[in-house]
């Protein structure tokens, strides 16, 4: 029994090392921020009790956001334009203008108002914590 357990442990260590090596070869020595910057391009949604929000991250750093009352998208709450960047596992969004009148309360344009610390980033889900340390997520919209 000990031999089987020892063999299993050695196999697991070797397999884990190989898998890690293969993953590093696939991405090369590309820093995680550069990988995130490529993966984030596209449209994502996030939802909570008060809204259903679609976020568009475009090449070159342009950001657009549409917030609806719910996922049926019948009532538009606001539209925002801005810029995004990723640095040190953190997503920064700077809002530049609002497409609703009056402007969205609590949003200061030209100042970074959303700082999201990325905790997990896959091809389809971004998990992050906001300024209040609440865990939230974006889910990729298939187009």
Image: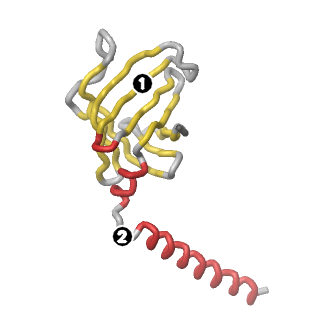
Residue under pointer 1 = 66
Assign a secondary structure to mark 1. Answer: strand
Quadrant in the picture for the N terminus: bottom right
Q: Give the residue pinned by disc 2.
A: 29
Residue neighbourhood size for the residue with mark 2, other residues' Cα within 10 Å, grouped as few (<14), some (14–19), many (≥20):
few
Residue 103 position in % (x across, y down):
29, 14
Q: How many marks?
A: 2
Identify the mark at residue 55; answer none if there is no mark: none
Percent coordinates x, y for residue 10 in the rendering:
63, 84
- Depth check: 39 or 131 in front? 39
Q: Residues within 10 Å of mark 1 (few under 14, many from 20)?
A: some
In the image, residue 118 above or below residue 142: below
Q: Is residue 77 above or below residue 37?
A: above
Task: Say above or below: 129 vs 98.
Answer: below
Q: Is residue 51 left or right of residue 11?
A: left
Q: Identify the element where label 2 is drawn.
A: loop
Task: Give the residue at x 31% y 54%.
Answer: 88
Residue for point 30% across, 27% down: 81
In-image side of 78 versus 18 (left or right):
left
Nearest the viewer among 129 and 139 is 139
């Amino acid at each position: 029994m000990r031999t089987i357990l020892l063999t299993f442990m050695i196999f697991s260590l070797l397999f884990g090392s190989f898998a890690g090596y293969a993953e590093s070869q696939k991405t090369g020595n590309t820093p995680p921020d550069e990988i995130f910057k490529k993966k984030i391009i596209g449209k994502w949604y996030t939802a909570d009790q008060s809204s259903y929000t679609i976020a568009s991250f475009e090449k070159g750093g342009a950001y657009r956001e549409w917030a609806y009352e719910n996922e049926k998208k019948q009532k538009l709450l606001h539209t925002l334009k801005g810029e995004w960047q990723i640095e040190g596992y953190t997503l920064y969004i700077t809002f530049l203008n609002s497409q609703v009148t009056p402007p969205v309360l609590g949003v200061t344009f030209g100042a970074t108002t959303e700082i999201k610390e990325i905790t997990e980033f896959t091809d389809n889900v971004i998990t992050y914590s906001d300024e209040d340390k609440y865990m939230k997520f974006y889910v990729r919209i298939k187009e």
